[in-house]
């Protein structure tokens, strides 16, 4: 039987609308960051990227600020400037991380990232914590001051399947190992999520904090053999496409998820169910 119902576009648009909201996205110049800043902009938000680099491929309607999130004072200063310009800080996505690259992108993060655990350089270990965990804490602190005053806000921490399962090193070239810091940082982000969600329950109950555990993404630079290995790991038989998390991100940043806080949402093609 054909459906005779008119699609209520207003209902759907209102549920997911970010009109008038201001969002800070760390690592907004990166591969997935670009997706998120674009999606949130399309949903009506004022979007500001905090990144150590500027991405010239992003349109002029995306504000890009050079902010090193490991520098707490800089983060506080930049966040206050955003609040003064737009009048509120409504959304923070802690997305920046040091994520060692594979395939044709591998050189951008260096071969040291793949050393055996016992040889892993202290400098990289500390760097991963500084960007992925400390940076997320400083950005959350800076935004929280405004969100508590507003008694509204949404914080989203970008974790990974590595936060709930161990990396399977067998998928990498022989002798290469995913850094131990990566899963440790991502697991810690789940703790950060729960800590802040509970804290806001006592200080500003309309501020919600969630995290997402995302599976690997194919940006088009992976070797076919590696792609096939990633496909074997999940139920959909392939890694995610770069734009496939946009719906989840928009959902968790909008009123559509208004009763969700302290949660860990997994989007991994079923990988961690197996
Ligand atoms: N790519 C994947 O397959 C995948 C899978 C699961 C989860 N994730 C997570 O998604 C997020 C984004 O991943 P990506 O693949 O887009 O990574 P990416 O490396 O392309 O982007 C990370 C961005 O963070 C920025 N950055 C690094 N240090 C910074 C600092 N000190 N201050 C501010 N910005 C800084 C980088 O300049 C870069 O633009 C990460 O948290 C990553 O762990 C990625």
Image: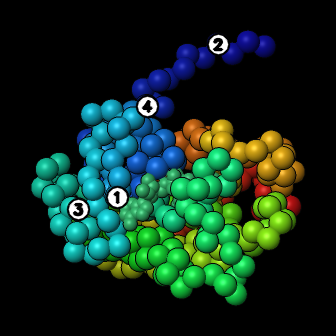
Q: Which residue is mark 1?
A: 52
Q: Classify 10 Å Cα crowding around label 1: few (below 14), some (14-19), many (20 and above).
A: some
Q: Which residue is mark 4?
A: 13
Q: Quadrant of residue 138?
A: bottom left
Measured in 3D between alpha carbons, the distance from the residue under mark 1 to the one under mark 4, in whole angstroms, is: 33 Å
Q: Which residue is mark 2?
A: 4
- Image coordinates for residue 208, horizontal then vertical, percent: 42, 64
Q: Classify 10 Å Cα crowding around label 4: few (below 14), some (14-19), many (20 and above).
A: few
Q: Is residue 224 above or below residue 123?
A: above
Query: Label 3's element?
Result: helix
Q: Is mark 1 within 8 Å of ligand 1?
A: yes
Q: Which residue is mark 3?
A: 79
Measured in 3D between alpha carbons, the distance from the residue under mark 3 to the one under mark 1, in whole angstroms, is: 15 Å
- Image coordinates for residue 212, horizontal then vertical, percent: 58, 60
Query: Label 1's element?
Result: loop
Q: Is residue 120 left or right of residue 73?
A: right
Q: Earlier in the sequence, mark 1 or mark 4?
A: 4
- Image coordinates for residue 151, horizontal then vertical, percent: 27, 64
Q: Earlier in the sequence, mark 2 or mark 3?
A: 2
Q: Earlier in the sequence, mark 3 or mark 1?
A: 1
For the point 66% across and 78% down, the residue is 180
Which quadrant of the rendered structure holds the C terminus?
A: bottom right
């Amino acid at each position: 039987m054909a459906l005779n119902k008119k699609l209520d576009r207003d209902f759907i648009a209102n549920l997911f609308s970010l009109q008038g909201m201001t969002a800070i996205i760390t690592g907004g110049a990166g591969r997935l960051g670009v997706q998120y800043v674009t999606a949130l902009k399309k949903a009506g938000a004022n979007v500001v990227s905090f990144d150590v680099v500027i991405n010239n491929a992003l349109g002029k309607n995306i504000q890009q600020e050079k902010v090193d999130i490991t520098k707490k004072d800089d983060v506080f200063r930049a966040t206050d400037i955003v609040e003064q310009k737009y009048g509120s800080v409504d959304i923070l996505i802690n997305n920046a991380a040091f994520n060692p690259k594979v395939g044709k992108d591998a050189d951008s993060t260096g071969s040291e990232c793949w050393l055996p655990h016992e040889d892993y350089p202290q400098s990289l270990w500390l760097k991963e914590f500084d960007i992925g965990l400390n940076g997320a804490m400083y950005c959350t602190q800076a935004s929280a001051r405004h969100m508590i005053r507003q008694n509204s806000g949404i914080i989203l921490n970008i974790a990974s399947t590595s936060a709930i399962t161990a990396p399977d090193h067998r998928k990498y070239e022989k002798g290469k190992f995913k850094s131990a810091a990566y899963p440790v940082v991502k697991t810690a982000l789940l703790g950060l999520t729960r800590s802040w969600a509970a804290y806001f329950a006592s200080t500003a109950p309309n501020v919600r904090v969630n995290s997402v555990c995302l599976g690997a993404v194919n940006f088009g630079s992976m070797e076919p053999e590696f792609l096939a290995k990633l496909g074997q790991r999940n139920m959909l038989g392939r890694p995610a496409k770069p734009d496939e998390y946009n719906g989840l991100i928009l959902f968790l940043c909008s009123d559509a998820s208004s009763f969700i806080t302290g949660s860990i949402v997994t989007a991994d093609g079923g990988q961690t169910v197996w």
